[in-house]
Image (cartoon, helix red, strand yellow):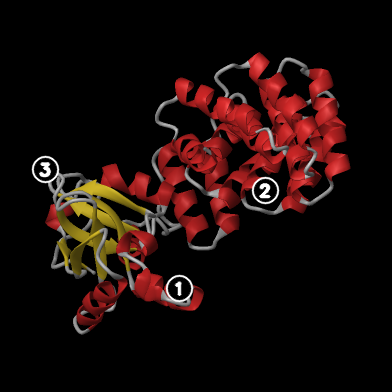
Amino acid sequence: MYIMGGIKLDQDTKINEMEITDEFVMANSTTSVREIANKLQKLREETDHGAVLVTKDEHEVIGFITQKEIVDLMITETDPSQKAAEDIMNTDFMNIREDQTLGNVIPLISEKYPNSIVVTDTDGGCVGYFSKNDYSDALAALGIYDKSQEPKSKNDWRTRGIAMSSSGDKAEALKCYEKSIESSSDKEKSWSRLAKSMEKNNRVNDALMCYDKALEINSENDEIMLEKGKLYSEENTEDLAVQNYKKALEMNPNNVEAWMNIGMEQANSGNIEDALQSLDKASALKSQSPEIWFKKGSVYEKAEKYEKAIECYTQTIELNDHHEEAWFNKGVALKQLGKRGDALQCLIRLLQINPANESAREALNTWR
């Protein structure tokens, strides 16, 4: 928890001026789940917000484990005792230095809104840990949620918007985002840039909200509709992804990426014929694209049409001789047809391109 202790939090308050009493213990990444559970049980005797911080060595924190991760493991695994800390740790955290001010870190925290924060000294050693509840309290103490306090800059408006969105107040968040771009001469572009920033920080709902605002300004922007489709695809909402790709193509039938992406969504849904038709349209528009030929090959391979897959992978390689996945997949398809020698030659060529490709090396040892 944050103990104010008479200290009024403001933008100039340093992290090391705050008393951090959230308990934590350290554990190596190979520590067994049983031992992690014992450590957490001991912590629960002292605090409700304790965590085990997982280290790669004795210095660098690479993740954290709370009771939630243990419970999730018990639900999903039949034999959780075989797991180690690195298998179940949560990596959604961020590091801040103890000598940084709240004014420096609050915008970063608000934007990323991680599940926890690790406080380090100037040498990178861990000196503290904040749970999400705790740093939310700090945001409130700084007036981030206080609507009676007017933010001073567009970045402050954006910070408040992210905080409002994270707290569930989407309507207020949108008002804040509107304020953050109020002075922009090109609001369509500003909304798109803001959406990209949100997307980069895995704030999917905020990104979609910003893209929709850009589309309100220009409802025929096929690139923005394409970006929405890609976001939905990343979130595994295939129906919405396809809907947005189709809308992008209604706006611009020559949008190559939309044809390519809708083809892959159709393939993932088992609609092989439709997928190949979409990819054919993409390749007709951009015949020299190795990625389109590669994706066509992967669809043919999915349909177990290995000869057609090999043709597409060969075309991919002709356009880009260093396309590692094409060499590997061509080898797999050749092996499926019983052409073991040719398959091995694909792997050998791949390892010439990239000697560190472990998949190729393992396959080579297995297939010989």
Q: Report which residue position mark 3 lands on.
A: 123
| Res. 72 mark | 1
Q: Secondary structure at mark 2?
A: helix
Q: Residues within 10 Å of mark 1 (few under 14, many from 20)?
A: few
Residue 168 at least partly seen: yes
Of circles 1 and 2, which is in front? 1
Q: Secondary structure at mark 3?
A: loop
Towards the viewer: 356 or 45:
356
Q: Where is residue 76? Give x, y as percent.
A: 50, 73
Residue 355 vs 60, above or below: the answer is: above
Q: Where is residue 37? Give x, y as percent.
A: 28, 77
Residue 346 vs 121, above or below: the answer is: above
Residue under the point 63% across and 34% down: 340
Are the two marked residues, 1 and 2, in contact with CB atoms closer than 8 angstroms? Answer: no
| Res. 232 mark | 2
Q: Which of pointers 3 and 1 lies earlier in the amino acid sequence?
A: 1
Towards the viewer: 346 or 100:
346
Q: Which of pointers 2 and 3 lies earlier in the amino acid sequence?
A: 3
- Left or right, 42 with respect to 248, comes to left
If the image is split into quadrants, where does the N terminus sit? Answer: bottom left
The amino acid marked with disc number 1 is: Asp
The amino acid marked with disc number 3 is: Asp
Of circles 3 and 1, which is in front? 1
- Left or right, 21 with respect to 81, comes to left
The quarter of the displayed image where residue 116 is located? bottom left
